[in-house]
Amino acid sequence: MTHPPVPSPIQQLRTGRLPRRLVQLYAGLVLYGLSMALVLRADLGLDPWDVLHQGLSEQLGWSFGTVVVVVGALVLLLWVPLRQWPGLGTVSNVVVIGVAVDAGLAVLPPVDSLPLRVGLLVGGVVLNGLAGATYLASAFGAGPRDGLMTGLVARTGRSVRLVRTCLELTVLAVGLLLGGTVGVGTVLYAVAIGPLVQLFLPLVAVHLPARAGDPEPVGLKAG
């Protein structure tokens, strides 16, 4: 299957419907950070990257959000040899999500009740799917971690499935060794996040003006 070329940062800004897309980008990123805070407070297991973030946070004594920002920036540096172009969404992803997750943790107290923790986990995963679809549909570029994956796929010729699996197993193993939390939430996230993003994408798709040569309006579609 051939994928269309990824628009450059300048093309992303010139695509159209800029105010709507900017609002959607930053709303999605803030919601993404809040969803992470919900899953953290559930304390029933995190997605692989957040297992790494939590492990580093415990070892370094930094806030979770600070670690998210620093790791995101380091991952973004890996784009250079892969010849990936970050968009506004990529750079914003590095900063906004980290700030939002720390704000969410400051507001949400720790929870002891198991039913409440399960509710936080399920709500956090669902919100994460909605938030991910929302900022992806703004068409301002992939997040640093997804961009690392697509860059490795392009450079190695390996499948998306293989590269993503290897990356996530690696960060999961390192995070676990550093003291990150693995549990039922880790499994739930792995199973549910793809279908959830697929479900929400059509609801938040931004239909952009047709360009010269396009047979119909351009918009981000699920699939």
Image (cartoon, rainbow, N blue to C red):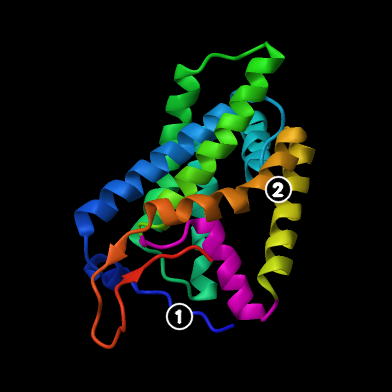
- Residue in the image at 62% along x and 23% along y: 119
| Residue assigned mark 1 | 4
Name the image quarter holding residue 86: bottom left
- Residue in the image at 74% along x and 37% along y: 178
Give the number of marks.
2
User: In the rendered view, would you say 135 is above or below 111?
Assistant: below
Answer with left or right where residue 53 lies relative to residue 96. right
Amino acid of disc 1:
Pro
Answer with left or right where residue 171 lies relative to residue 4. right
**Helix, strand or loop status at disc 2:** helix
| Residue assigned mark 2 | 191
- Residue in the image at 75% along x and 42% along y: 187
Task: Give the magenta range.
Answer: 139-158
Position of residue 218 measured from the top left corner of the image (x, y, whole percent) = 33, 72
Q: Residues within 10 Å of mark 2 (few under 14, many from 20)?
A: few
In magenta segment, residue 149: yes
Q: Residues within 10 Å of mark 1 (few under 14, many from 20)?
A: few
User: Which mark identifies residue 110?
Assistant: none
- Residue in the image at 67% along x and 43% along y: 189
Q: CA distance from mark 1 to mark 2?
A: 27 Å
Image quarter where the N terminus lies is bottom right
